[in-house]
């Protein structure tokens, strides 16, 4: 039995430095749990001159990442450099050299996961990525292992902390979107370029990873229908609250008639739903299964400390196999289920119309709903004259019918403006 397992770190930024610090701080317990010491033997960074405030000797640092993945004294690679390249090539080289890999890189796994899963299987090495989805919240391993006997029907997640923080500020402090985004950036929750967060790309990458595990499906981030939160207004949030809903950026994956439907978009969710109370930059994943019913995972979706704990959990798991034998769960998806097009998904909807204030308006609007096979669940008329508006919530309808309805409403003379619309995620779905 080896008395130490050699670790190579690719990256020593927010997550990598915290991994190094935590491995040192928890060394005794981790050694007992593994049955051997975990030893960081090489660390690749871009800039060797940077002050890193980690308890590692200068001699382990290199700016040549290939040296790390080819080092024969290293059995486990931790990839926390981010981005597609050179991370992808380095991981493939590590597999080819017989090394196990742990990664926190949602962008890479959400885009090119299949290539990496297949390569790991071919090389008979382990590839784990708990930290790639919801940082410190355990969800990858629970789906892969604890719920492996379940037929998961639906996953509804709040997978992006930045957008949840912005929506919380808009809802609780009536802060405008731009101001809330600036605050999220000041707090370090969002990058200087916030596109990946606010346009839903980050949540889509994470959702595709979860769906690939839960449904054994070959899906990637590009298969996820995606809308960001930039069009959500304070008025939408106020109307939602009056109707008993909270507005969240939801990431939803579900099995429908043997197909996999995946979408990320702002949605109204009943204020009584557990996801409605997920505030600030926290993350949560609500899993619905055939036998288990509903299970929710909740916590810190980002930050060096929480993310490092997920990374180290994966490292300990693989190190235990190195020391004591056995292998981890293989990931390559064998499923052949197709991705369901967005226009074939079903949801409830909210729509806000500015209308002419004259008799017969409600009848014409109702007729448009009937003509498009969308049934009205509730309707509220507010204001008079130029301010007259209709706030409507539908029963569950087909997305393509709802989109056709919006077009029809825009063509009605008595509808001055379709001010906004939003999907409603509720128990009726
Ligand atoms: N931060 C979070 O809260 C969080 C949460 C979940 C997942 N993640 C994921 O974890 C990964 C790391 O995130 P992070 O926030 O720790 O990033 P970060 O602070 O920017 O750190 C990246 C590190 O990688 C090094 N690096 C980048 N490109 C390199 C290259 N070509 N060769 C050698 N070294 C290179 C950088 O070196 P220098 O230091 O010399 O620049 C830096 O040490 C990303 O995939 C991210 O999506 C992060």
Image (cartoon, grey):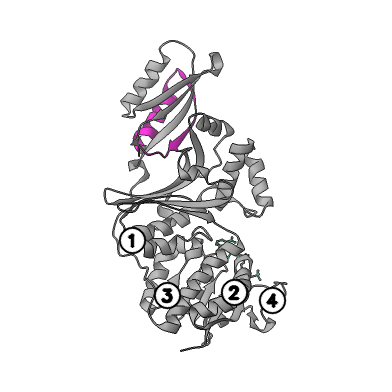
Residue 160 is at least partly visible in this image: no
- The residue that label 4 is drawn on is 48
Quarter occupied by the C terminus: top left
Q: Would the CB of label 4 be found within 8 Å of ligand 1? A: yes
* Image mark count: 4
Of residues 77 and 136, the one nearer the viewer is 136
Q: Which mark is residue 126?
A: 3
Q: Position of residue 300 (x, y in %)?
A: 56, 56
Marks 3 and 1, how far apart at CA:
17 Å
In the image, residue 275 sits, relative to residue 149, either above or below, namely: above
Q: Which mark is residue 216?
A: 1
**Which of disc 4 and disc 2 is earlier in sequence?**
2
Q: Are marks 3 and 1 in contact (CB under 8 Å)?
A: no
The mark closer to the camera, 1 or 4, is 1
**Which of disc 1 and disc 3 is earlier in sequence?**
3
**Which of disc 2 and disc 3 is earlier in sequence?**
2
User: Does the magenta run of residues contain 199?
Assistant: no
- The residue that label 2 is drawn on is 26
Ligand 1: image quarter: bottom right
Q: Position of residue 95 (x, y in %)?
A: 44, 78
Marks 2 and 1, how far apart at CA:
35 Å
In the image, residue 281 sits, relative to residue 212, either above or below, namely: above
Left or right of 157? Residue 47 is right
Which residue does the image show at 50% across and 77% down from the upper left? 33
User: Does the magenta run of residues contain 423?
Assistant: yes
Numbered range of the magenta stretch = 400-429
In the image, residue 141 sits, relative to residue 101, either above or below, namely: above
Which residue does the image show at 52% across and 18% down from the upper left? 388
The mark closer to the camera, 3 or 2, is 2
């Amino acid at each position: 039995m080896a008395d130490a397992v050699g670790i190579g770190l690719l990256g020593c930024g927010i997550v990598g430095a915290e991994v190094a610090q935590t491995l040192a701080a928890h060394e005794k317990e981790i050694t007992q749990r593994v049955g051997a010491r975990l030893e960081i033997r090489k660390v690749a960074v871009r800039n060797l001159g940077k002050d890193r405030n980690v308890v590692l000797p200068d001699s382990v640092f290199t700016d040549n990442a290939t040296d790390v993945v080819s080092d024969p004294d290293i059995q486990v690679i931790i990839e926390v450099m981010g981005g597609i390249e050179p991370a992808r090539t380095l991981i493939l080289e590590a597999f080819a050299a017989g090394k196990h890999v742990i990664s926190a890189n949602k962008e890479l796994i959400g885009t090119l996961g299949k290539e990496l899963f297949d390569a790991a299987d071919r090389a008979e090495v382990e590839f784990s990525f708990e930290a790639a989805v919801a940082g410190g919240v355990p969800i990858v391993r629970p789906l892969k292992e604890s719920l492996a006997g379940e037929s998961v029907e639906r996953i509804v997640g709040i997978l992006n902390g930045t957008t949840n923080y912005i929506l919380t500020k808009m809802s609780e402090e009536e802060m405008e979107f731009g101001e809330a985004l600036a605050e999220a950036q000041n707090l370090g929750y969002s990058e200087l370029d916030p596109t990946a967060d606010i346009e839903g790309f980050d949540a889509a990458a994470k959702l595709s990873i979860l769906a690939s595990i839960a449904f054994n499906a070959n899906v990637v981030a590009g298969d996820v229908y995606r809308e960001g939160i930039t069009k959500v207004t304070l008025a939408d949030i106020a109307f939602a609250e009056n109707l008993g809903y909270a507005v969240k950026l939801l990431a939803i994956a579900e099995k429908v008639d043997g197909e996999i439907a995946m979408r990320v978009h702002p949605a109204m969710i009943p204020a009584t739903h557990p996801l409605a109370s997920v505030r600030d930059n926290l993350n949560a994943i609500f899993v619905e299964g055939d036998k288990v019913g509903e299970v929710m995972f909740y916590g810190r979706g980002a930050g060096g400390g929480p993310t490092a704990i997920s990374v180290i959990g994966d490292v300990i798991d693989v190190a235990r196999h190195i020391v004591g034998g056995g292998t981890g769960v293989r990931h390559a998806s064998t499923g052949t289920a197709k991705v369901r097009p967005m226009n074939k998904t079903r949801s409830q909807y909210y729509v806000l119309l500015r209308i002419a204030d004259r008799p017969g308006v409600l009848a014409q609007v109702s007729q448009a709903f009937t003509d498009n096979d969308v049934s009205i669940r509730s309707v509220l008329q507010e204001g008079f004259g130029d301010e007259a508006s209709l706030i409507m919530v539908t029963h569950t309808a087909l997305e393509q019918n709802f989109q056709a309805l919006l077009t029809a409403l825009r063509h009605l003379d008595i509808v001055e403006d379709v001010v906004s619309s939003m999907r409603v995620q509720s128990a009726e779905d």
